[in-house]
Image (cartoon, rainbow, N blue to C red):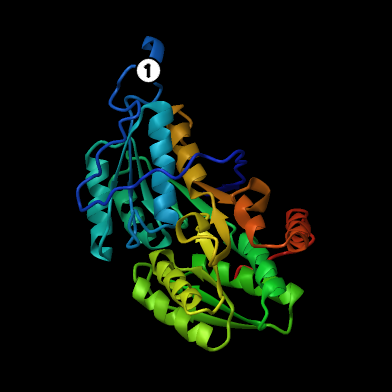
């Protein structure tokens, strides 16, 4: 039976680590304290004997989104504990089971699956390998040897909906999703509710591209929405969202000011403050770090589902929002945040 709990997360893990490309072989281990090397002073780091890996979904490890955030969490873990961390990048649905199996058979102490669409494959591999320890982001796998982590994306998306609703000048706003799956529907539902709460007359147009790894589709979808008068687009589309930013930058060069609301990470750090209004961040890096570190400490609990929301700092807006979002709007965001945390506002999930 799944037990639903709330995991308190405090502080922000260091990010911004440089990521290299990867084919179908595991990436080289992060060598910061890895491989059983003694730490300073002759003490062996706690995780030196642990191998922890992750399998990406189709967005890949450099998706500027949740896969990348997960990998950054593992890289930080390697630096702090001495654990060896690797990833396998999936280029098609058919590679999920082989990639997960490769890590399990390779005696990895913990294998992560990143993304909702890996859920069925992880269930299969977990059933076939009952002694293996696995964990998944953005889906719930009902198995005694899998820890599942989901987020209240609808809560964080509500807040960026408040920003969009208050800051649109055309009262036309867009939402671009990747695949039409429950996790992305939570983004859509929360965003829609947030916009409506502060600007009920705003028109919100929804567009699903059907992919997380197709920037060209994101660019085309953004072009359509901007042409229709939208001045703000929120994307929840993984690497496909890169195309949304590219379209916004092209329009800025042509003298037209439009905005993008990023997702999962503070995307202003990659795409710039000139087109990034704010971002709805998910602390995938912190969740991956925390559970992996629990494994090293002997606290892994299979069969558990962890749900992270605003009260856990699992979702929210980055501090860089103040660069483009006025103080009065941020105050409104904080007011709505507290109402959600206190239960005064129940944010829809679909």
Query: x, y (%) of residue 169?
Result: 68, 80
Q: Nearer the viewer, residue 349 or 209?
A: 209
**Residue sitting at the far top:** 41
Within-10-Å neighbours for mark 1: few <14, some 14–19, many 20+: some
The reply to whether residue 318 is in sight is no
Question: Regarding mark 1 in the picture, which secondary structure is present there?
Answer: loop
For image coordinates 66% across by 66% down, the residue present is 158
249 vs 91, left or right, is right
Q: Is residue 234 left or right of residue 67?
A: right
Quarter of the figure with residue 247: bottom left
Q: Name the quarter where the C terminus is drawn.
A: bottom right
In the image, 229 versus 102, the foreground residue is: 229
Q: Is residue 273 above or below residue 208?
A: above
Q: Is residue 283 above or below residue 28?
A: below
> Where is mark 1, residue-wise?
39
Percent x, y for residue 99? 25, 52
């Amino acid at each position: 039976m799944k037990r639903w709990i709330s995991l308190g997360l405090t502080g922000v893990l260091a990010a911004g680590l440089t990521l290299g490309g990867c084919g179908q072989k595991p990436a080289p281990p992060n060598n910061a304290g890895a491989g059983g090397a003694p730490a300073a002073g002759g003490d062996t780091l706690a995780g030196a004997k642990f191998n922890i890996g992750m399998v990406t979904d189709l967005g890949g490890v450099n998706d500027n989104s949740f896969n990348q955030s997960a990998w950054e969490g593992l890289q930080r873990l390697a630096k702090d504990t001495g654990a060896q961390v690797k990833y396998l990048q999936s280029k098609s649905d058919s590679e999920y089971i082989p990639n997960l199996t490769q890590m399990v058979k390779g005696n990895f102490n913990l294998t992560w699956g990143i993304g909702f669409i890996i859920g069925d494959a992880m269930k299969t591999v977990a059933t076939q390998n009952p002694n293996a320890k696995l964990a998944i982001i953005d889906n719930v796998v009902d198995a005694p040897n899998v820890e599942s982590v989901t987020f209240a994306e609808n809560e964080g998306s509500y807040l960026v909906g408040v920003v969009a609703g208050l800051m649109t000048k055309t009262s036309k706003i867009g939402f671009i999703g990747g695949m039409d799956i429950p996790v992305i529907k939570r983004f859509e539902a929360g965003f829609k509710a947030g916009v409506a709460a502060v600007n009920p007359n705003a028109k919100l147009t929804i567009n699903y591209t059907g992919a997380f790894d197709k920037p060209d589709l994101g660019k085309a979808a953004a072009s359509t929405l901007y042409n229709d008068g939208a001045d703000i687009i929120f994307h929840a589309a993984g690497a496909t969202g890169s195309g949304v930013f590219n379209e916004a930058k092209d329009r800025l060069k042509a003298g037209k000011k439009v905005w993008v609301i990023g997702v999962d990470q503070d995307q202003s750090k990659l795409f710039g403050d000139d087109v990034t209004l704010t971002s709805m961040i998910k602390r995938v890096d912190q969740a991956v770090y925390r559970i992996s570190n629990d494994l090293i400490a002997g606290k892994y609990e299979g069969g558990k589902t962890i749900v992270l929301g605003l009260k856990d700092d699992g979702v929210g807006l980055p501090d860089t929002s103040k660069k483009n979002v006025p103080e009065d709007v941020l105050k409104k965001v904080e007011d709505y945040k507290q109402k959600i945390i206190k239960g005064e506002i129940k944010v829809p999930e679909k």
